Amino acid sequence: MAEQPRGSVTLMDVAARAGVSLATASRALNGSTRKVGDDLRERVLAAARSLNYAPNAQAQAMARGRTNVVGLVVHDIADPYFSSIAAGVMEAAEGHQVLVTLGSTLRSPGREVDYLVALRGQRSRAVILAGSRMDDSTVADALRREIDIFENDGGIVVAISQKQLPVDTVVIENRLGARDLAASLVDLGYRRFGVLAGPDAMLTARDRVHGFREGLGRAGIDLDPAFVVHGAFTRDGGHQAMGSLLGAVSAGDLDCVFAVNDVMAVGAMVACRENGLTVPQDLGLAGFDDISTLRDINPALTTVRLPLEKVGATAFELVVSAAERTKARTRRIKGEVVLRQSTRPAVTP
Amino acid sequence: MAEQPRGSVTLMDVAARAGVSLATASRALNGSTRKVGDDLRERVLAAARSLNYAPNAQAQAMARGRTNVVGLVVHDIADPYFSSIAAGVMEAAEGHQVLVTLGSTLRSPGREVDYLVALRGQRSRAVILAGSRMDDSTVADALRREIDIFENDGGIVVAISQKQLPVDTVVIENRLGARDLAASLVDLGYRRFGVLAGPDAMLTARDRVHGFREGLGRAGIDLDPAFVVHGAFTRDGGHQAMGSLLGAVSAGDLDCVFAVNDVMAVGAMVACRENGLTVPQDLGLAGFDDISTLRDINPALTTVRLPLEKVGATAFELVVSAAERTKARTRRIKGEVVLRQSTRPAVTP
DNA sequence: TTGTACGCGTTATCAA
DNA sequence: TTGATAACGCGTACAA
């Protein structure tokens, strides 16, 4: 049996036990394949196994000058939007000998910069910035600056959301999706719209509002600014915004409400219920994202489906293929309108 | 302005720019507070700032012999159960100068061992194993063995779920919660129960079934084994299991169904609807966990509330307080029955 | 208080 | 093919 040495087993221990030099042990365990005699290789592998040797990744990183760490920075890991993206990243990373470290900014944009610094300290090979960019030039400038430094150190940066930064980006077609949704809702016969708009500075929210307004405009419908209520990008934000909206309008002013994401839509649905309104009979309601956990709410939510796991996987692919890139690349992910019971069926003539 | 040097800035660069020795620079930036003259300290800090210096965490780790990396291993990060726990861990880690690395086993128990090896290679300070233990002695033995090695290297291991491993554990009182739930359901007047039981080998699922059966037994009610249907611990698993159950029993055999977690309950609710059953009029339905994302489904789910973020935070506290422990500690987290609309109101005499 | 020099565990370069 | 040895960047005795 193998004895259990106290403290970490080093390559030197392995080499000693196998009766070979450090260099040989290193080559047998990690270096290029065909350079160590089979007998010695066997001895080294056996020694490593019996000693439970695990290479010190820190030391390897120092010697090699690079790591296998990829940082993933999200706004809030408890939000299903981000946990789905994270799952996509993790799955894509499978088999790539990569360790994913998770950062959660708790929805405070400035913290992205902090994580970037920390991950630079870790000499992370790459960082994936998942989550909406903000309309805040101070933060954006600081971020851009830190990204420069990070990339100058040889790191890779990939963003998910808007093409605001000069890095490889998985662009989510929020605007297009919202435009299509608007068109579909008009097709269903809706005419008087309200919007629960999320935070004004959040580009994802803003793009969706813009796209929606655009879609309505093409159908000759105006979106009254008074019917656009901002609120947090959360369930409670949606709940509150819907409450305000309902308080501000009179019955008949509204026949359909678009919440810029599904969790807000769910909050809005509750607010409707509390106000005695039935969806979709009294009011149509639509969301955005098609969060899988929310697919079974009743009435089922009309929304724009986003392949979130694919978004994460795509970001990871940008990371692994970054070596051969010549300039910042863009991958566009489209959403697809899904009509369900929270909006009424199309009026058949 | 600061020039942007090509490649990483090292402490030597900072020392040179500040005109001090390496040791002084090190002390000014990291070492104990009161050992560097104010003037020199200022010079060093200024130099570091102007050069965008970020300490090489790998090198620090090597020199110090320890890291600030904590590994979090979950079954599936897309599952709200785990993403809530992860959020709790992240929030608790806030301000502790710790980087959390995320592992997702994709529900394959053997992968926990792989992550443990990888994290040992990283010289992680600690690993949090979140997720049910399995009734699989092969895996458990391998895990125990690898945990020994990990701890022997000075690492800390914390488990969340059952006290199956000889490590600090956040024990979730599944059994107790399910027992209480059973009692509450009996109080509501239910008598003929079915259970959607999850995978047989998963201890969390099994504990909940046992506890539920226990609770019924105390009320003098027998749980017919034919009414216990196993299935995956997911929405689809619940959907399928409920389908089987409804196919196997005749109307009147059943007046309430307990799904061992909320996502299964949601799947079950859909299956009910598909079979023309209305919850709770035709059938009561209860879950477990009180997943926040699912709180707004309709009818609202009767369930056992688990403070998942607190679970994660508690696990992290065990990590940071591990130094002063003498033997494996246990923190028990209780659930609380929450009665909602998916079960009928109590019959008033 | 400040500086010198060694060690952390590994890879990679050079000889042998 | 194998082995000795110099990096890698930092912390920290030890000496000054």
Image: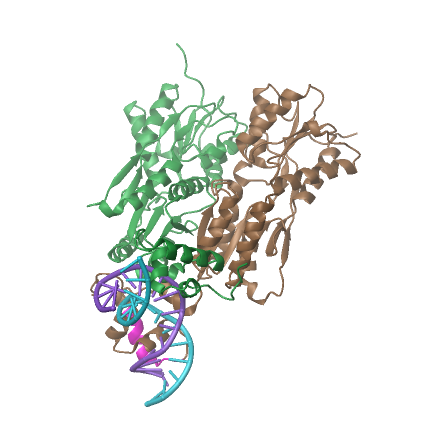
Chain colours: A brown, B green, C cyan, D purple
The correct choice, above or below, for B63 with respect to A234 in the image is: below
Asked whether A40 falls inside the magenta stretch, the response is yes
Residue A87 seen in the figure: no
The correct choice, above or below, for B152 with respect to A177 in the image is: below
Camera-side residue of A168 and B301: A168
Asked whether B294 falls inside the magenta stretch, the response is no
Residue A72 seen in the figure: yes
Q: Which residues are magenta?
A: A35-48
Kindly indicate the quadrant of the structure image that contains residue A346.
Answer: top right
Horizontal arrangement in the rendering, residue B40 relative to residue A173 (left or right): left
Horizontal arrangement in the rendering, residue B154 relative to residue A103 (left or right): left
Kindly indicate the quadrant of the structure image that contains residue A45.
Answer: bottom left
Tell me the quadrant of the picture where the N terminus of chain A can be found.
bottom left
Kindly indicate the quadrant of the structure image that contains residue A169.
Answer: bottom right
Provide residue B278's location: percent of width, then percent of height: 52, 25
Provide residue A340's location: percent of width, then percent of height: 64, 34
Horizontal arrangement in the rendering, residue B339 relative to residue A307 (left or right): left
Q: Residue at x 74, y 38 (%)?
A: A215
Q: Residue at x 68, y 21 (%)?
A: A249
Q: What's the magenta bit mostly, secondary-structure-wise?
A: helix
Camera-side residue of B75 and A198: A198
Provide residue A110's location: percent of width, then percent of height: 51, 45
Count the labels in the image.
Answer: 0
Camera-side residue of B155 and B179: B155
Provide residue B132's location: percent of width, then percent of height: 35, 44
Tell me the quadrant of the picture where the C terminus of chain A can be found.
top right
Q: Residue at x 59, y 40 (%)?
A: A290
Camera-side residue of B148 and D14: D14
